[in-house]
Amino acid sequence: MNISLLINGADRAASGGRTYDRLDPFTEKLASRAAAANLEDVAAAVDAAAVAFNAWSKTGPGQRRAILMKAADIMDSKVGEFTRLMIEETGATAPWAGFNVMLAANILREAGAMTTQISGEIIPSDKPGTLAMGVRQAAGVCLAIAPWNAPVILATRAIAMPIACGNTVILKASEQCPGTHRLIATALTEAGLPAGVINVITNAPEDAPEIVAALIAHPAVRRVNFTGSTKVGRIIAETCGRHLKPALLELGGKAPLVILDDADIDGAVNAAIFGAFMHQGQICMSTERIIVDATIADQFVAKLAARASQLPAGDPRGHVVLGSLISLDAAKKMEELIADATAKGAKLVAGGKRSGTVVEATLLDHVTSDMRVYAEESFGPVKPIIRVSGEEEAIRIANDTEYGLSSAVFSRNVQRAMAVAARIESGICHINGPTLHDEAQMPFGGVKGSGYGRFGGKAAIAEFTDLRWITIEDSAQHYPF
């Protein structure tokens, strides 16, 4: 499948004529061939977005809403095409692809609903005869940089609210799934989004640093949002800082699932299985540390290991729960984490085998802080179980990480769970539910090394608008001189 750039409403080859190939990680066959943009293409995309901003920012909320709602229906109708692309480009399973499309369409609908919620306020002024207002206005051109792991959800999230707020956008597609990301823009343009409001840049992997630096540096770009690794997020933040451009960053995670001694064990097992192994653990909210009270640990681990051992893994086109990891390197990293932990005393209680890019659901019990899997984001189906003595140690271990995105606490005592949740350093915490959950209207984001800013609902309006102070005053007012 050949993937073109989208610039000012038109499909374009890269100005230099270059392309790059994305291979199916499971079959190693060609998945897509995409245009490899250069700096000339970057300038053309930003210029197109800057010109389109003048009219789009003045478009009424009803028209913006209608386009976003229509785009959501079109996206739903393309679920088959999205699923094929996600399987071929990223090794995802069909259920994960279907969920991506469903939630992404809802993100578009939620953004549509927000077009009339971009409100301001009247603020009392000490100056007689003055009407003072706080008014939110579209910021300008927004750069959206989206990842491959939940490609339809996260790329749609990166552009939906900026567009709803009256901004124009440039989506820098992931090198791992250019076709999937480009199809999102097709849904929007088919819905009637004017030329230049969304532009898509695809680039060869080796060109990414230069392309991103040029996009951020362009004077017309006023906002940046990035979802991806903490390592790259720091580079994005530093670059944005040099150019004094606000950035919304949703980065890595090491989500703790804290299971207190009074937890519903079967409920906690269900949440752990889903949170740890959905999409092979390649989700920023994936359960990355299972922290369980020692008094119930034997019973919990036995049930969890029995469930994990039954999860089928293999060809993502088949009836499996775990499909392919994104690359062979990612799969080999899982083996390294297992070897490191077992060499230092961890007990392998489920899984542990790799076949190509497929890794079984794997659980390591008795993990300690000297093991790599304790602190490193695995971003795969290898999960540590950490046994603790009491609530205080559970909280300490939960916070013993550079990350702070999602978390969860299991306890039959909701007041106790609320008190523990209040002390966990994360942007998201679910009580008696999995670490893995998302809804379009919720404020989504993290703290510490997981980034800053919030996607979703009203919280996102503040990220993609400028708050201005505007007054209407008495022209005959008195001045002191």
Image (cartoon, rainbow, N blue to C red):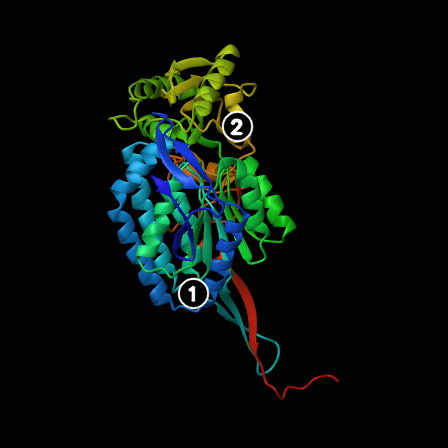
Q: How many marks?
A: 2
**Badge 1 vs badge 2, beta-carbon distance below 8 Å:** no
- 281 or 296, which is in the foreground? 281
- Looking at the image, which is closer to me, 90 or 72? 90
Residue 443, position as x, y percentages in the image? 44, 49
Task: Using the rendered view, name the quadrant where residue 178 is placed.
Answer: top left
Secondary-structure class at tag 1: helix
Which residue is found at the position 50% from the left and 50% from the top? 41
- Percent of width and height locating residue 477: 64, 86
Q: At label 1, which amino acid type do we have?
A: Trp
- Residue drawn at x 39%, y 46% as measured from the top left: 4
Q: Which residue is mark 2?
A: 397
Q: Secondary structure at mark 2?
A: helix
Residue 69 is situated, as x and y percent measured from the top left of the image, at 30, 57
Query: Residue 300 location in percent, x, y?
Result: 36, 21
Where does the N terminus fall, quadrant-wise?
top left
What's under tag 2, amino acid-wise? Ile
Numbered badge on residue 56: 1
Quick one: which residue is furthest to the bottom in this view? 476
Q: CA distance from mark 1 to mark 2?
A: 48 Å
- Name which of mark 1 and mark 2 comes first in the sequence: 1
Relative to 321, residue 122 above or below: below
Describe residue 108's horizontal placement relative to residue 214 as left or right: left
**Crowdedness near tag 2: few (<14), some (14–19) or many (≥20) residues, C-alpha within 10 Å:** many
- Write the residue at 57% across / 83% down: 129
Question: Taking the image as drawn, is residue 402 in sight?
Answer: yes
Of the pair 459 and 316, the residue shown nearer to us:
316
Residue 432 appears in view: no
* Residue found at the far front of this picture: 17
Name the mark nearer the viewer: 1 or 2.
Answer: 1
Residue occupying image coordinates x 34% and y 56%: 189
